Image: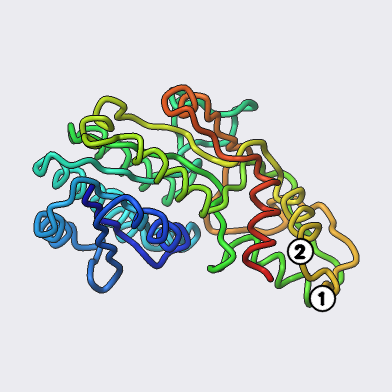
Amino acid sequence: MNILLIGKRGQLGWELNRTLVTLGPLVALEYPEIDLSQPAQLRNLVREYRPQIIVNAAAYTAVDQAEAEPELAFRINQDAPAALAEAARSLDAALIHYSTDYVFDGRKKAPYLETDATNPLNVYGKSKLAGEQAITASNAAYLILRTSWVYSLRRSSFVTKVLEWSRTQQILRVVDDQVSGPTWCRSLAEITAQVLSRGGDNPVTWLDERSGIYHLAGEGYASRLEWAQAILRYDPHPEEQQTQALHAARSQDFPTAAERPAYSMLNTDRFFRTFGLRLPDWRQSLELAMAEDCE
């Protein structure tokens, strides 16, 4: 299958660039080759390459900065996916797009289903939801994969920040009132490739028959504090740690421009029923990520 990957240098895009190349001819683009803030240019570029599968790993992800740049966030997170979906439909191609747990307000006390009502609390979540809605309305073949707390050891993430803090601070204060499922970007890229490989000789038709929104995140859940505890436990260089204690804090202790959902665990049963696949438990993935990428 001919694949066009949008966003090859981000934490997920870097992993997708490694995994999708095994499935067939792959063109992977990044800014300034492609500018998601220019939807018309985006449509033309997709039509030039004429892929069977478009994988959009690019997004405006600066959650707090989005509060000050809503127009740019919506251009990249709503208008660009809309343009990709329109181009996919015109080419009889399929679009795989990644979304976020931040489309929910976090007030539910059980893992969110795909059918649960959305109610984003911040501009980032609103722009990502608008992108979902644009794709859904396009009549293109698509998979929208909502995920949560994605991290990489190659890019700045919560994991790399905790490791950095542990080298310089004796006491770390981490919030324990935000709960979700940490997701290693490599496992997310690999399961994307597994799904695509099951499409056989007609991947677009196969995906079209399964079009929809799916939740896909590391199994299990953790608070930010529990995640930080696991990061320090699996650190392959504990001798470099200066941290003597981890203390629980509240979100209100660290004011941010954007409000985060308190509980955004995603129920992944629909993805499993459809594709027969799950991501590993978040602890297993974290241990593997730390062993591979921190040596």
Residue displayed at 76% across by 51% down? 225
What is the crowding at mark 2: few (fewer than 14 residues within 10 Å), some, or many (at least 20)? Answer: some
The answer to whether 136 is drawn above or below residue 287 in the figure is above
Q: What label does residue 41 carry, if any?
A: none
- What residue does disc 2 label? 235
What is the crowding at mark 1: few (fewer than 14 residues within 10 Å), some, or many (at least 20)? Answer: few
Q: What label does residue 240 carry, if any?
A: 1
Q: CA distance from mark 2 to mark 1?
A: 9 Å
Residue displayed at 32% across by 43% down? 96
- Verify CB contact (< 8 Å) between mark 2 and mark 1: yes
User: Image quarter for residue 49?
Assistant: bottom left
Residue 52 shown left or right of residue 57 in the figure: left
Residue 211 rendering spot, x and y as whole percentages:
29, 29
Q: Amino acid at mark 2?
A: Asp
Secondary structure under tag 2 reads loop
The answer to whether 119 is drawn above or below residue 117 in the figure is below
User: Image quarter for residue 204?
Assistant: top left
Secondary structure under tag 1 reads helix
Residue 263 shown left or right of residue 43 in the figure: right
The answer to whether 97 is drawn above or below residue 152 in the figure is above
User: Image quarter for residue 245?
Assistant: bottom right
Q: Amino acid at mark 1?
A: Glu
Residue displayed at 44% across by 46% down? 125
Residue 163 rendering spot, x and y as whole percentages:
72, 68
Residue 35 shown left or right of residue 86 in the figure: right
What's the image's color scheme? Answer: rainbow
Residue 234 shown left or right of residue 154 in the figure: right
The answer to whether 222 is drawn above or below residue 29 in the figure is above
Chain-order first, disc 2 or disc 1:
2
